[in-house]
């Protein structure tokens, strides 16, 4: 796949400021590169991380993945694969309840996604033009579950998973969901 060689070097995603490689880099089946970079928030800022994405294009640059992008991605997929997306969201709601935050810098640096193979096996048929691969979504959702668990009483990501499911089911207006993930307002 073609990548911007300023940012994808020897299998690692790099950022420019500060210039450093990702703590851990993953490549989804569609070629999307997903990297974990040091964060600074939450109850354990030393273990916090940010998720950056690099698309397989020569002119692409890494960007922080905003929550509205994975939500819209799943809403688009849900228009074509409603039952499977509901099952996928239930899968990650269950994963959220059982996952634990990273206990050490070493654990974070060596992390391998736990849900990727199962999600690709169960939901690999979900392909919607213009959306991310199901493997890319799996890595992102898993990382966001773990990241939110770093901070006790944090709940916005889990709520976004639940509300996305409710939107796909037709039980919640998508504007409520977008307000949650863009403006951080719960109503």
Image: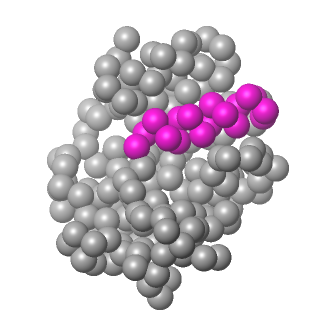
Whole-percent x, y for residue 83 in the image: 77, 30
Q: Residue at x 51, y 23 (%)?
A: 163
* The N terminus - image quarter: bottom right
* The C terminus - image quarter: top left
138 in relation to 28, above or below:
above
Whole-percent x, y for residue 99 in the image: 45, 49
Side of 139 relative to 18 (left or right): right
Whole-percent x, y for residue 23 in the image: 34, 73
Side of 90 relative to 155 (left or right): right
103 in relation to 179, above or below:
below
Q: Residue at x 27, y 72 (%)?
A: 16
Q: Residue at x 63, y 31 (%)?
A: 75
Q: How many marks?
A: 0
Q: Is residue 20 magenta?
A: no
Q: Is residue 49 visible in the rendered structure shown here?
A: yes
Whole-percent x, y for residue 51 in the image: 39, 57
In the rendered structure, which segment of residues is drawn in magenta? 66-82
Task: Single out the residue that lies furthest toward the bottom.
Answer: 10
Q: In terms of depth relative to the viewer, which is nearer, 70 or 139?
A: 70
Q: Is residue 87 visible in the rendered structure shown here?
A: no
Side of 26 relative to 86 (left or right): left
- Which of the 4 image quadrants contains residue 170? top right
5 in relation to 29, above or below:
below
Which colouring convention does the figure follow?
A: one colour
């Amino acid at each position: 796949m073609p990548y911007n060689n300023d940012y994808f070097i020897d299998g690692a995603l790099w950022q420019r400021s500060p210039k450093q490689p990702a703590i851990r880099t993953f490549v989804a089946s569609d070629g999307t590169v997903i990297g974990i970079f040091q964060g600074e928030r939450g109850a354990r800022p030393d273990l916090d991380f940010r998720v950056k994405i690099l698309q397989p294009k020569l002119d692409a640059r890494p960007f922080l993945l905003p929550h509205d992008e994975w939500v819209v991605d799943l809403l688009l997929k849900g228009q074509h694969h409603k039952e499977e997306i509901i099952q996928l969201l239930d899968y990650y709601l269950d994963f959220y309840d059982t996952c634990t935050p990273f206990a050490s810098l070493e654990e974070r640096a060596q992390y391998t996604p736990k849900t990727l193979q199962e999600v690709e096996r169960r939901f690999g048929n979900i392909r919607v033009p213009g959306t991310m691969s199901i493997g890319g979504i799996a890595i992102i959702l898993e990382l966001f579950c773990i990241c939110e668990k770093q901070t006790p009483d944090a709940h916005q990501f889990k709520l976004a998973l639940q509300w996305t499911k409710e939107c796909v089911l037709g039980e919640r207006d998508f504007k409520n969901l977008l307000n949650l993930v863009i403006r951080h307002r719960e109503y």
